[in-house]
Amino acid sequence: MKKLLFLFFILTTLFANEYHDEDLDGVPDRLDRCPHTPFSDIVDEYGCSIERLIKPKQYEWYVEYIYAKDKDVIDFSEHDYLFYLTLYKGRFDVSITALYFDNASASGFSDTNIKLEYRFTPTPMWDLYVGVGVDLPLYNQEGNFFDYDIYISSEYYYLGYKLFVGGYYTYTRDKISSHRLQNPYSTYAGIEMYNGKYSIDFAYLYTKSKFGAYSNSLYLKLERRLYKGYYLYTTFTKGINEKALDSLLSIGFGQRF
């Protein structure tokens, strides 16, 4: 009888204070980034199952195969092999991205990127990231030097959706015939819908290359979470103007922990 009275007291107190927790995970709906989690799941401070952490706590890595095609450049096609690793420490993370490319005219490693990023959390539902990076000149071509990057991005979570926007700006020292190339930049905006073990991303990308070409693309990603932090994903990018690559298709495998 005492237990029933205690439970009744707790419930009436919660409702009196307008506390709403639809999935009963201990995180109020107004702060829950992952609504409708199964009752048995252990969740983090954002209400997300440990299989779907919003921000990995220790590391993330993945490998990805990319196939690019562009009929405007003599039926150009390319095979890319990408490796990515991020280590997390509190609000800081450091990542490295390396890519090997292979097409009809050349093959080898592109410049390898190293990035340091810091995460702000202005509100429980909003993350803001700022970072700096350097591109190591591994691409074997005369006139290839170190490049320096600035990054900024923002993510907002609401009832199973994530709205994101961001971009980067690069100061390049690369040259062709003693002429320095232009500083490239890119911006993007999109939405992610996640539910259980699946997530879908849809985004728009706008990019200026080192050669001054502007491209507009649409991006789609489907991810399936497996177990112990492993996941499998595929992406499709469609160029929507003449300067953009016609299409990129990729498949990747990785782990967040």
Image: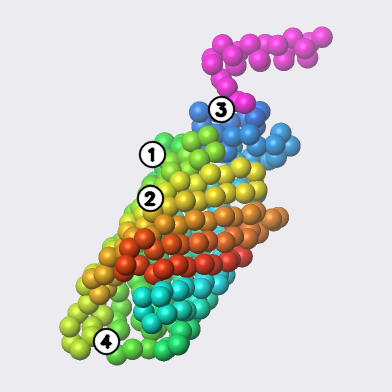
Q: Residue at x 62, y 26 (%)?
A: 22
**Residue 181 in the image: above or below residue 52:** below
Please name the residue that numbered disc 3 is placed on: 28
Q: Residue at x 74, y 9 (%)?
A: 5
Residue 60 highlighted magenta (yes or no):
no
Q: Position of residue 178 (x, y in %)?
A: 18, 87
Q: Which residues are drawn in magenta? A: 1-22
CB atoms at circles 3 and 2 under 8 Å apart?
Answer: no
CB atoms at circles 2 and 4 under 8 Å apart?
Answer: no
- Few, some or many residues within 10 Å of mark 1 (<14, 14–19, 20+): few
Q: Amino acid at mark 2?
A: Ala
Tell me: 159 left or right of 75.
right
Q: Nearer the viewer, mark 2 or mark 4?
A: 2
Circle number at residue 15: none
Q: Amino acid at mark 4?
A: Gly
CB atoms at circles 1 and 4 under 8 Å apart?
Answer: no
Give the distance between the C-alpha atoms of the residues marked 4 and 3, in whole angstroms: 56 Å
Q: Position of residue 163 (x, y in %)?
A: 43, 43
Q: Is residue 78 visible?
A: yes
Please name the residue that numbered disc 1 is placed on: 122
Give the distance between the C-alpha atoms of the residues marked 3 and 2, in whole angstroms: 28 Å
| Mark found first going from the N terminus, 1 or 4 | 1
Please name the residue that numbered disc 2 is placed on: 189
- Few, some or many residues within 10 Å of mark 3 (<14, 14–19, 20+): some
Please name the residue that numbered disc 4 is placed on: 143
**Residue 229 in the image: above or below residue 210:** above
| Mark found first going from the N terminus, 1 or 2 | 1
